[in-house]
Amino acid sequence: MKADRALASATYSKVDRHIIPFLFMCYILAYLDRVNVGFAKLQMAKDLSLSDAAFATGAGLFFIGYFFFEVPSNVLLKKFGARMWIARIMISWGVISSAMMFVTNEWTFYAMRMILGLAEAGFFPGIIFYLTLWYPSRQRSTRTAWFVSAIPLAGVIGNPISGWTMDQLTGVAGVAGWQWLFLVEGIPSILVGFWVISYLDSSISEAKWLNEEQKALLIRNLDAEERHKAEHRLVDAFKNGKVYALCAIYFTLMIGLYGIAFWLPTIVKAFGVKGYLDVGLISAIPYGVATVGMLLVSRHSDRTGERRMHYVLNVSAGALGLALSGVYASNPVLSIAFISIGTMGVIGSMPLFWPIPSAFLTGTAAAAGIGIVNSIGNLGGYVGPNVPIWIKQVSADPSAALYAIALILLVGAAITLFLNPKSVNIQPAPALEADTSSSSAA
């Protein structure tokens, strides 16, 4: 038994080291290319005569394109294999993201954002599904947290880089800083996309870096868990009511995420901060807090096997943080402190959420179910950037948008309370040869 546990621990640590840092790097690039438009807005809005409403529409149109191709993309990933399909996604989105530098007006802005969404569709749910091919449910939240922590770290690293790029390259070769921003942050996605082809394996059996004993252990642990899941056909995902409840919950979470992501640089600049680099450094603070909080909460969730109340309490704390940041909007220090709590509540809830679909779905149903939840839920990415615009029409309070987003997050927490704990929490898995949920990818 001791030898078995040692083998399992060594095997999962090896998988962690090989897979997680690489996926983490890929998602940093994905998230930067998706939200760097929030930083580019600080210049391009004036250059292209974009109103706040036009910017919010263009930012949100990404998620409309994303919606239409999300489920097909995830099903195709399962059919053609993760290696080639993820590479295709990264290369195509890198090319289109770089081409954003050629936007000339609001209509080309709308078109390019829509096309970028089509190109990136399937990446995030594809990775979530990919993790199910390596890790059983009890070990998945911590690994998902390491992967999803790319979102706040993209803010920690990306915002200062975006600010520096716009400060230093504005006017170089007659090109605007926002144009350089899209080019500089798009090219790495293309290069890493080609790297995916030689690095990732589509299944355990393809992994030449594992020996046969290690492969057998991973497969046994997955098979032991899959035997307890009845829903594995494509149609099962579309028929399951829990899938649509998760869509609603994730929809509210994405409103919070992108309401923060697309407007945070503008909020910080409104404090009177001068210089794009300084805006980037201050904007990085909430993401740094979110990174630490996410890892701590998800690790505790893995250890206890409890998902539902972890999600409810964490996202509710985030809602309170956003509301208080609005209350203290006139005090930059307190406002940023509470936005940090809000950001942790939103981003930190993602690794608690994503192990849930695969707790009751398997096979093609898992691929489709994850795609359905992500595509419908990500429509909240269209709503989030538009909330401040819509709220302005009914309230003159500049903090009203933060209150509205906080209320929406609480609605998602309330829906989560109605989920059956037995279907979303992780049940004991006696066949699992070792519980290595506390191991890290470091």
Image: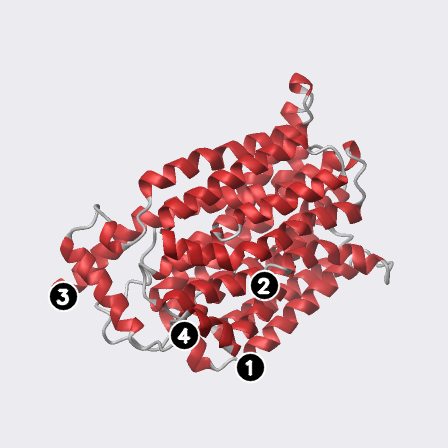
Side (left or right) of 429 relative to 118: left
Q: Which mark is residue 377?
A: 2
- Residue at image position (16%, 51%) is 211
- Asked whether residue 161 is in view, the answer is no
Label 4 near label 2: C-beta < 8 Å?
Answer: no
- The one of 224 and 329 positioned closer to us in this rendering: 224
Q: What is the x, y in percent for residue 38?
A: 67, 43
Q: Is residue 90 left or right of residue 408?
A: left
Q: Nearer the viewer, residue 337 or 126?
A: 126
Q: Which residue is denoted by mark 3 in the rendering?
A: 2
Q: Amino acid at mark 3?
A: Lys
* Residue drawn at x 20%, y 57% as measured from the top left: 215
Comparing marks 2 and 3, which lies closer to the viewer? 2
Residue 394 visible: yes
The amino acid type of the residue labelled 2 equals Gly
Mark with earlier residue (2, 4): 4
From the viewer's perspective, is the residue at label 3 or at label 1 nearer?
A: 1
Give the percent coordinates (x, y) of residue 40.
68, 37
Report the Cα–Cα distance between label 2 and label 1.
18 Å
Mark 4–mark 3 Cα distance, whole angstroms, equals: 31 Å
What is the C-alpha distance between the residues marked 3 and 1? 41 Å
The mark that comes first in sequence, 2 or 1, is: 2
Pair 4/3: label in front = 4
**Cβ–Cβ under 8 Å for marks 4 and 3:** no
Per the image, the residue denoted by label 4 is: 360
**Residue designated by label 1:** 418
- Circle 1 packing at 10 Å, graded few (<14), some (14-19), many (20+), is few
Q: Which of disc 3 and disc 4 is earlier in sequence?
A: 3
150 versus 391 height, above or below: above
